[in-house]
Image (cartoon, coloured by chain):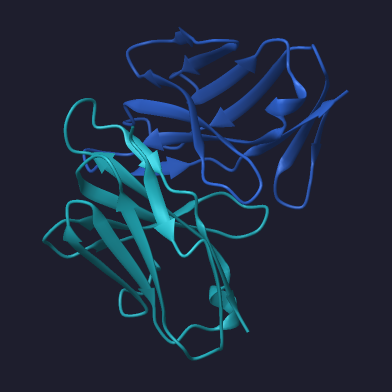
Chain colours: A cyan, B blue
Amino acid sequence: GAVVSQHPSWVICKSGTSVKIECRSLDFQATTMFWYRQFPKQSLMLMATSNEGSKATYEQGVEKDKFLINHASLTLSTLTVTSAHPEDSSFYICSARRTSGKNEQFFGPGTRLTVL
Amino acid sequence: GESVGLHLPTLSVQEGDNSIINCAYSNSASDYFIWYKQESGKGPQFIIDIRSNMDKRQGQRVTVLLNKTVKHLSLQIAATQPGDSAVYFCAERWDSSYKLIFGSGTRLLVRP
């Protein structure tokens, strides 16, 4: 149990286009999901906290108009990278916090975004 | 021994030896800490956690030590195996929002 999936696992797009990444909790409900970005050989940097039914909370320095987050249900959060540029190329990872029990967080497998 | 790479420090150990990976955390108010293992191209995998009211916790082949005085965490891996080769991150639960802040990470290389 406690599986989190991401789709797509990798995506290549042209500069200026928008890309949507999905994060799903497959067998549990997640009131809160988190989005991280990881550049090569670096740590995970928290981008935003996504709360079901309300606006996301962005970390300092993360542009909310560029990284649109929607958490429309208890099992799905989406991150849309708008007008992507090469510097947005990164590994995007989500995590989902289980609503019940120990409130553990479970991580998805990540999405590799390459912007040409 | 340890060496500092481009961004991630690297710990190289002989198979069968014990490994100790260290981490400094930031927030003295953090109440919960987790160690994750990340293999190339994958998401973080939970290894072991510890609450701030404890100073030691043991799992299978792993032990986490917490020193709140100096805001330091360590992960000890006993009898290190080739499958342990990965990047290891500590994370602290920052506040009541449950968001996790990750440390800089250490790459563990296990020599056969």
Residue A49 image-quadrant placement: bottom left
Q: In this rendering, is residue B52 above or below A95?
A: above
Q: Is residue B110 above or below residue A47?
A: above
Of the 4 image quadrants, the one containing the N terminus of chain A is: top left
Is A59 placed left or right of A87 in the picture? left
Total count of labels: 0
The answer, for residue B66, to whether it is visible in the render is yes
Residue furthest right as drawn: B112
Question: A32 or A109, which is in the foreground?
Answer: A109
Residue pictured at 31% horizontal, 80% vertical: A65
Q: Residue at x 24, y 25 (%)?
A: A102
Residue under the image location 44 percent in, 28 percent down? B34
Relative image position of residue A2 (x, y in whole percent): 33, 35
Pick whichever, A55 or B54, lies toward us. A55
Front-most of residues B23 and A97: A97
Taking the image as shown, residue B53 lies to the left or right of residue B71, namely left
Find residue B62 and report its image quarter.
top right
Q: Is residue A89 above or below residue B101?
A: below
Image quarter hosting the C terminus of chain A: bottom right
Q: Position of residue A37 (x, y in %)?
A: 49, 59
Res A12 quadrant in image: bottom right
Residue situated furthest bottom in the rendering? A16
Residue that sits furthest to the left in the current view = A53
- In percent of width and height, residue A93 lies at 46, 54
Can residue B98 be seen here? The reply is: no
Q: Position of residue A24 (x, y in %)?
A: 31, 53
Instruction: Examine the rendered structure and indicate whether residue A43 appears above or below residue B81.
Output: below
